[in-house]
């Protein structure tokens, strides 16, 4: 039986706990937009935020040249990630991205995104390959934790705890591969 992580609701008359990372005025504006149509649409958020006095305005880049360049960088990253390579492991085909995000390279402050490395090179670089897999597992762990929190909040978390423990265990094993073995076990 899964344990519940849902905190008790605040006593009536008290405000809800604040949403993390956003000013209350921005949260109120998002809720207002949601109430208008019963759902929150990104297009509505952008349209409302166009007004300089809107509390959401500051969260957007309004210089079209800068915004267009950032969008093109996003498009370039999407394009890079679409290229796949199929490798065979014990005669089983495994399709993965050809270009893998390289966490071992420090991001240039003038560049907006981390560079990618070709699988053909990474496969021969054990330390870099391990760092890439650790980053992949961190994303898995973050996604599982988010799903775990959402499931708990929605009171449907039956099996997600086991998935979270497994993801954390795998991540821990990969991290431990980077450490020296204890003395006497070398």
Image: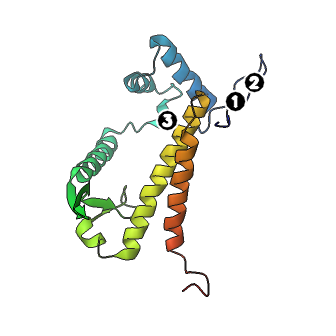
- The residue to which callout 3 is attached is 58
Q: Give percent across and percent down for residue 77.
A: 29, 51
Q: Give percent across and percent down for residue 179.
A: 54, 76
Element class at badge 3: helix
Q: Is residue 16 left or right of residue 69?
A: right
Q: Mark 1 or mark 3: which comes first in sequence? A: 1
Element class at badge 2: loop
- The residue to which callout 2 is attached is 10
Place residue 89 in its image quadrant: bottom left
Q: Is residue 38 left or right of residue 6?
A: left
Give the Cα separation between the discs numbered 3 and 2.
31 Å
Q: Give percent across and percent down for residue 181.
A: 56, 81
The answer to whether residue 47 is visible is yes
- Residue contact at pointers 2 and 1, CB within 8 angstroms: yes
Place residue 91 in its image quadrant: bottom left
Residue 117 disc label:
none
Residue 17 disc label:
1
Element class at badge 1: loop
Q: Give percent across and percent down for residue 74.
A: 31, 46
59 lies above or below 109 = above
Q: Residue at x 75, y 24 (%)?
A: 10
Query: Which circle, 2 or 1, is nearer the viewer?
Result: 2
Q: Mark 2 or mark 1: which comes first in sequence? A: 2
Q: Mark 3 or mark 2: which comes first in sequence? A: 2
149 lies above or below 133 = above
Figure label count: 3
55 lies above or below 170 = above
Give the Cα separation between the discs numbered 1 and 3.
23 Å
- The quadrant of the picture occupied by the C terminus is bottom right
Give the Cα separation between the discs numbered 2 and 1.
8 Å
Q: Is residue 176 left or right of residue 131?
A: right
């Amino acid at each position: 039986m899964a344990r519940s992580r849902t905190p008790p609701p605040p006593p009536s008359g008290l405000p809800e706990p604040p949403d993390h990372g956003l000013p209350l005025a921005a949260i109120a504006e998002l809720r207002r937009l949601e109430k208008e149509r019963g759902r929150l649409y990104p297009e509505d958020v952008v349209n409302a935020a166009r007004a300089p006095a809107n509390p959401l305005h500051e969260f957007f880049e309004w210089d079209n040249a800068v915004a267009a360049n950032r969008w093109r960088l996003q498009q370039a990253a999407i394009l890079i990630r679409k290229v796949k390579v199929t490798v065979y492991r014990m005669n089983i085909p495994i399709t993965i991205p050809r270009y893998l995000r390289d966490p071992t390279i420090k991001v240039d402050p003038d560049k907006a995104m981390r560079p990618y490395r070709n699988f053909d090179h990474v496969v021969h670089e054990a330390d870099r390959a391990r760092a890439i897999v650790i980053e992949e597992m961190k994303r898995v762990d973050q996604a599982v934790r988010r799903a775990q929190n959402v499931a708990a909040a929605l009171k449907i978390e039956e099996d997600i705890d086991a998935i979270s423990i497994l993801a954390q265990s795998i991540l821990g094993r990969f991290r431990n591969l980077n450490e020296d073995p204890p003395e006497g076990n070398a």
